[in-house]
Image (cartoon, helix red, strand yellow):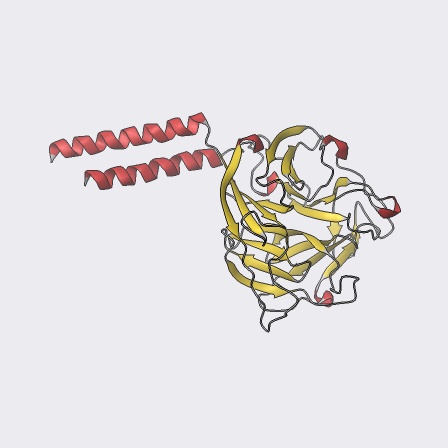
Amino acid sequence: MLRLALKAGAATALATASLASQAQWAGLNNYTLMASHALPTLSPSPPTPTRSLQFEASAVTWNKDTNTLFMLGDGGGFVMQTTLTGIPIDFMVLPAGASPQGNEFYDPEGLAYIGGGKFVMTEERYRTAVQFTYVAGSTLQRAQTQTVKLATTVGNTGLEGITADPLTGGFILVNQAGGNGGSLQNIFQTQVDFVAGSASNGSATAVNNTALFPVANIGYSNLNDVFALANVYGSNVLGYDNVLVMTLTGVREMSRAGVVAGSLALTGASNQFEGLTMDASGLLYVVSDNGDTGTLSSLLVYAPVPEPGSYALMLAGLAAVAGVARRRGRRA
């Protein structure tokens, strides 16, 4: 009985410490690698020999309604739903088409969940935002989507990442780097009216969008994804309005005024990190194009190191439980 009481008490204390740490944003500087999962090669049905789901994981987003992850894979071939450890659940095919890559959706690189089973992905080179409803086992046709062009078409340096922005009801996007036609590296916020086919900050003729803040403040040569902390933290949390910006080898926490608030070096500098997202518990999920666990893509999970106050709370809980167990033991 004493052993059972101690085990139960330990679990309670750990849960209490965990809940305490989730009540506030730990800050990006306090994150460390917790787990790394290989993303499997999963052939569709019927098999398509030239495509496999996770030879290239280019984006990831957390679905708060299902508590699962959704990823873009294989150069625009699929959207896949997985568990939080990267185990495939189901997928939706993105079909072949007339783009220079041979796909209907031209180099989709960003993905954001917006609720109600709906997602928005970006076509990097067309520089569009594409809203769609995920239907497992189906093929997504262009006619089933609502597409809004945010800027002129460029090469492989366009809209690389997107996040829903609860503070404005719109989106924050990153343009990866400077490219052809005068396009520049950028981070910007915009409202998108998918019914009207328009945006508050962007159009089919826009070469560059009005920046959220000077992009040079981030200090990265490539911008691969972005995540607004307001998706998981409320206005009572310090730093809730900050954004996380990813490059090939790291993540930077930025205020909306363009001030660096923290940094995280991602494990395996040779890997090409492409997407990031966060769940309600504060876990940070990162997908790499070249897997940390092998030649395939991988899912890396980062967690905040508990602050001293959390450790103290846990130890106090354990001490209290141990005291109760000793008193019960003496009475027995």
Q: How many marks?
A: 0
Q: How far from the left and from the top, in percent, is residue 126?
A: 79, 55
The residue under the point 55% across, 49% down is 299
Q: Is residue 9 visible to the viewer in this orientation of the structure?
A: yes
Q: Residue lying furthest left in this view?
A: 332
Indicate whether 106 appears above or below 248. Answer: below
Q: Residue lying furthest bottom in this view?
A: 46
* Left or right: 306 in relation to 183: left
Q: Is residue 195 visible to the viewer in this orientation of the structure?
A: no
Q: How far from the left and from the top, in percent, is residue 162?
A: 68, 47
Q: Which is more toward the observer, 187 or 95?
A: 95
* Left or right: 206 in relation to 286: right
On the image, which quarter does residue 309 sit in? top left
Q: Which is more toward the observer, 234 or 215?
A: 215
The residue under the point 59% across, 53% down is 295
Q: How far from the left and from the top, in percent, is residue 317?
A: 32, 31
The residue under the point 67% across, 66% down is 140
* Left or right: 194 in relation to 309: right
The residue under the point 67% across, 54% down is 120
* Left or right: 293 in relation to 118: left
Quadrant into which the N terminus falls: top left
Q: Which is more toward the observer, 235 or 272?
A: 272
On the image, which quarter does residue 78 sit in? bottom right
On the image, which quarter does residue 121 sit in? bottom right
Q: Which is more toward the observer, 312 or 48?
A: 48
Quadrant into which the C terminus falls: top left
Q: How far from the left and from the top, in percent, is residue 116?
A: 59, 57
